[in-house]
Image (spheres, rainbow, N blue to C red):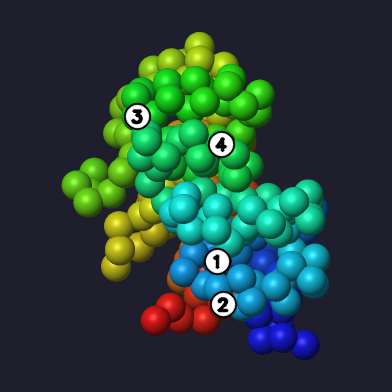
Amino acid sequence: MHKTVQNLISIQSAIKSKLLSLKEKNRIPKIIAVSKTFKIDHILPLIDYGHIDYGENKVQEALEKWADIKKKNDKIKLHLIGKLQTNKVKYAVKIFDYIHSLDSEKLAKKIAEEQKKCGVSLKIFIQINLGLETQKSGIAKENLINFYNFCKKLDLNIVGIMCIPPYNEDSSKYFSEMSELSKTIDQKELSMGMSADYLNALKYNSTFLRIGSNIFGSRS
């Protein structure tokens, strides 16, 4: 059995144990295997095992790696977890199934425009910059309701919210805040939790876990 598959099975077991301890054994969060920067031959064992959710940061890399694979396997779901530039939207809507990083009205308009051209409807998360970090994308939490309503008027399929907590801080307070914020727009999907803190994210109702290095190993 390939090491990546062993790692995934170990993560699934840890998640199952955590949810049992939380008395939520019936909850099944999605594990997004963050495959950014890894070559497709490193990912194929997971695909062959049957895993379907993968995360990429860059549109061009995703197109090069996944276009042929997705034609052969229509069950695969590709998640854009990095910042999306408006000039890349027309390519993104052709390869991705989810966008986790919607962060501006300009981008929302562009996604709506390109989706209509292609006749598709991606599942979209609004990214929240809870730590108000200048180097990170995302809207301020105070703007969430207005921004959500703006997106709904564009007929965007907003399924939830996403965050990346500040590095080297306890993520619990941010995950807790996200769990409460999701109730204000009546959306249950939460994209939060990565390799270092995904079990912690489960305590705060995360439904999409973005796990890279714990599955694929460290990046060079």
Quarter of the image for residue 117 reads top right
Mark 4: which secondary structure? helix
- Left or right? Give the position of 101 relative to 97: left
Q: Which residue is mark 1?
A: 35
Give the amino acid at mark 4: Val
Q: CA distance from mark 4 to mark 1?
A: 19 Å
Q: Earlier in the sequence, mark 4 or mark 2?
A: 4
Give the amino acid at mark 3: Ser
Give the amino acid at mark 2: Phe
Residue 213 placement (x, y as % from top left): 50, 75
Q: Earlier in the sequence, mark 4 or mark 1?
A: 1
Q: CA distance from mark 2 to mark 1?
A: 7 Å
Q: Earlier in the sequence, mark 1 or mark 3?
A: 1
Q: CA distance from mark 4 to mark 2?
A: 26 Å
Asked whether residue 205 is in view, the answer is no
Residue 138 placement (x, y as % from top left): 34, 39
Find residue 216 and name its label: 2
Q: Residue at x 42, y 40 (%)?
A: 88
Q: Which residue is mark 4?
A: 93
Q: Earlier in the sequence, mark 2 or mark 1?
A: 1
Instruction: Mark 3: give few (<14), some (14-19) or many (20+) Cα within 10 Å.
Output: some
Q: CA distance from mark 3 to mark 2?
A: 31 Å
- Left or right? Give the position of 60 relative to 1: left
